[in-house]
Amino acid sequence: MHFQARAGDKVRNPVLQRALQKAKPLFVGKRAKGIAALAEDGLDFETLRIACEDIRNRTLADLDVWLDIFEQRAMASGAEVLWARDGEEVGRLVVDIARRHGVTEATKSKSMLSEEAHLNEALAEAGIRPVETDLGEYIVQLAGETPSHIIAPAVHKTIEEVEALFAKEHGRPIEMRTSADIPDMTREARKVLRQHFLSAEMGISGANFLIAETGTAALVTNEGNGRMVTTLPKVHVVVTGIEKVVPTLEDFATLMRLLPRSATGQSISNYVSLLTGTKRDGDHDGPEKTVFILVDNGRANLLGSAYQDMLRCIRCGACMNHCPVYFSLGGHAYGWVYPGPMGSVLTPLYTGIENALDLPHATTGCNQCGSVCPVRIPLPKLMHRLREEQVERGLRPWSERLALKAWAWVAGHPALYRWATRRAIRYLNWLADDAGRIRIFGLAPGWTAGRDLSVGSGRTFHELYKARKRA
């Protein structure tokens, strides 16, 4: 994934840094207010987290059963249910559906799984035009980029960059003014997208949840595009992962207590759509054909493994919104669909641990991600397990593995360990300046490239502890 090289470029990009630092307090502040507001309704955040964790765990324990029930109920309501092993099969299935119904253009609501499957590329190669209609996704599609965030795909762009992009793609000159007009650009995008909503023969969406008892797809959005995509075209295709199923509407309602609050700080999203079956007699809108494509793409392999907890993820984005690493680099540094802490776990698991060696190390270990996760996924623990697996499989550099073995051997001999640490701290103290800081550490220059290394008192922990006991 070339994470280290990407990270170096991103951290030195002043435009990106300005965009990220402006966005972070908005995400964090809004979530904090949303969680605090739970108390006004007599609800407790930790109690809700435990309940949501339990719902996800109960579902995963019998995932095959709930998927079977969902398939039966969805088909009973007039929908078709298909299964896809991987992203390539998703592309083949969607293209086949499009060809059977004479589709030349497809509008899309935001779907990270379609990004996993490279669905836009598959459609374009088949001569079918895909049009992203979520405003952030529309912006990155115009720019020829991929999303930088699962909730706010264009969070890496400044207002001025978006204005210049619209001027280029829409053929509208930039007016002379002191700042970009966000409402004006939003109206402009809406005007352009409206013609696509009305002409597209197929709508493609993801699903935040699949509700087994009713065969329903639940779609949670803050823009009206989701409703347009799922009701106006004659064909609606839902592409989502097999782990998104929940047993009942009551379970869905419980999860919705925390999903929007964790994502955007809202008590409820602007649009919550429950999509079941096809258009019936007397309905004013809705698709004539509904197809669910339930995708594995590595998910089934996590069941029963040390990483099963990751399947609880409800894609709220809270982990990346609070991650100091993510907001130092942005999403594109991570190299695949999912950035931040969730991506540091999911990308190695879905693409192969050998293809993303740096990502489990892209963490400070602060556990901000784990503490805000609404379904209590122990993200730092999972990243640590991935690092262990890298060592066990011999995927880390030999020098690193040798150093770890040497440290482990020394640590296993307490007397030798104390002797070595005393000499090491004395050496570091000798290198330090009068303030007790090392400005450049030659043995490991990366540690001091962006900060000074403090050596404190120049004594080891054991020495300090003994001195305190004597006192």
Image: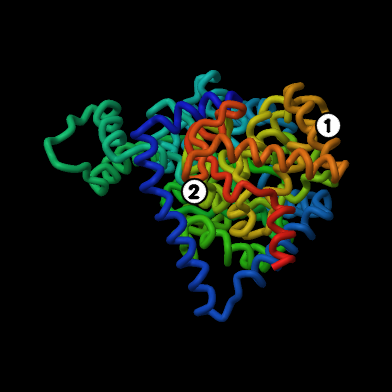
Q: Which mark is residue 335?
A: none
Q: Which mark is residue 392?
A: 1
Callout 2 amino acid:
Thr
Question: Which tag, 1 or 2, sits closer to the chain's start?
Answer: 2
Q: Which mark is residue 231?
A: 2
How many marks overall?
2
**Are discs 1 and 2 less than 8 Å apart at CB?**
no
Instruction: Let me know if residue 382 appears in the view.
Output: yes
Relative to 216, is 226 on the left or the right? left
281 over 327 or under it: above or below: below
Q: At numbered mark 1, what does the secondary structure look like: helix, strand or loop? A: helix
Callout 1 amino acid:
Glu
Q: Residues within 10 Å of mark 2 (few under 14, many from 20)?
A: many
Instruction: Let me know if residue 217 appears in the view.
Output: no
Where residue 288 appears, as percent x and y from the top left, is 56, 44
| 131, 198: nearer the viewer | 131
| 452, 137: nearer the viewer | 452
Q: At numbered mark 2, what does the secondary structure look like: helix, strand or loop? A: helix
Q: Residue at x 48, y 66 (%)?
A: 34
